[in-house]
């Protein structure tokens, strides 16, 4: 299964004190899952990790190095891009229809546009999030929640 990983999940992988940390680490190690995320995820998660590090929860340099490695060429998560204009159209539609946050809509739009070209016929496309509103919309657009 190909799974789009939202920032709300990715950040938990690096913050041991977050609820769901162990589940995310286990998901990242599952050989049955192909993990992808969008280009803006690095920026969004970096912001969360820098704030956490500056609050004393982790070493800033070390935590950012781990993120860069995981999103790098040899990392477990592939960073994907979709056409910006198409993402913006889809995200705007999702915000207007479902009243979700802009970045949540951006992640969903990116997943909606890219996942169909990555999954095999009959294979489910997954979406990993810890945000309930985003998860509800992901299900509406046909993604399996992890």
Image (cartoon, helix red, strand yellow):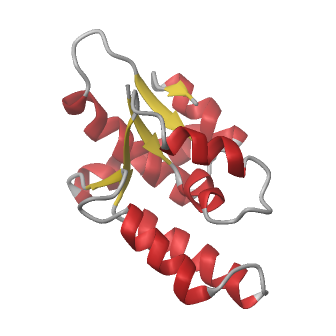
The relative height of residue 27 versus residue 10 in the rendered view (above or below) is above
The relative height of residue 96 versus residue 2 in the rendered view (above or below) is below
Residue 40 can be seen in this image: no
Which residue occupies the foreground of this view, 103 or 117?
Answer: 117
Q: Position of residue 13 (x, y in %)?
A: 60, 57
- At x 69%, y 84%, the residue is 53
- At x 40%, y 32%, the residue is 33
Residue 83 can be seen in this image: yes
Locate residue 54 relative to residue 38 in the image: left or right: right
Locate residue 87 relative to residue 73 in the image: left or right: right
Q: Position of residue 138 (x, y in %)?
A: 53, 32
- At x 73%, y 46%, the residue is 20
Q: Position of residue 114 (x, y in %)?
A: 26, 40
Which residue occupies the foreground of this view, 12 or 95?
Answer: 12
The relative height of residue 43 versus residue 102 in the rendered view (above or below) is below
Position of the C terminus by quadrant: top right
Which residue occupies the foreground of this view, 61 or 94?
Answer: 61
Position of the N terminus by quadrant: top left
Q: Position of residue 103 (x, y in %)?
A: 52, 59
């Amino acid at each position: 299964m190909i799974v789009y990983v939202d920032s709300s999940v990715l950040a938990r992988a690096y913050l041991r004190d977050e609820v769901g940390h162990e589940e995310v680490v286990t998901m990242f190690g599952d050989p049955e899952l192909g993990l992808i995320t969008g280009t803006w995820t690095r920026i969004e998660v970096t912001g969360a990790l820098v704030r956490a590090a500056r609050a004393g929860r982790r070493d800033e340099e070390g935590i950012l190095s781990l993120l860069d490695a995981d999103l790098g060429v040899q990392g477990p998560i592939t960073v994907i891009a979709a056409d910006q204009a198409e993402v913006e159209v889809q995200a705007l539609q999702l915000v207007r229809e479902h009243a979700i946050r802009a970045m949540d809509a951006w992640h969903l739009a990116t997943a909606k546009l890219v996942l169909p070209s990555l999954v095999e016929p009959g294979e489910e496309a997954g979406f990993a999030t810890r945000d309930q509103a985003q998860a509800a919309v992901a299900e509406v657009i046909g993604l399996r929640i992890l």
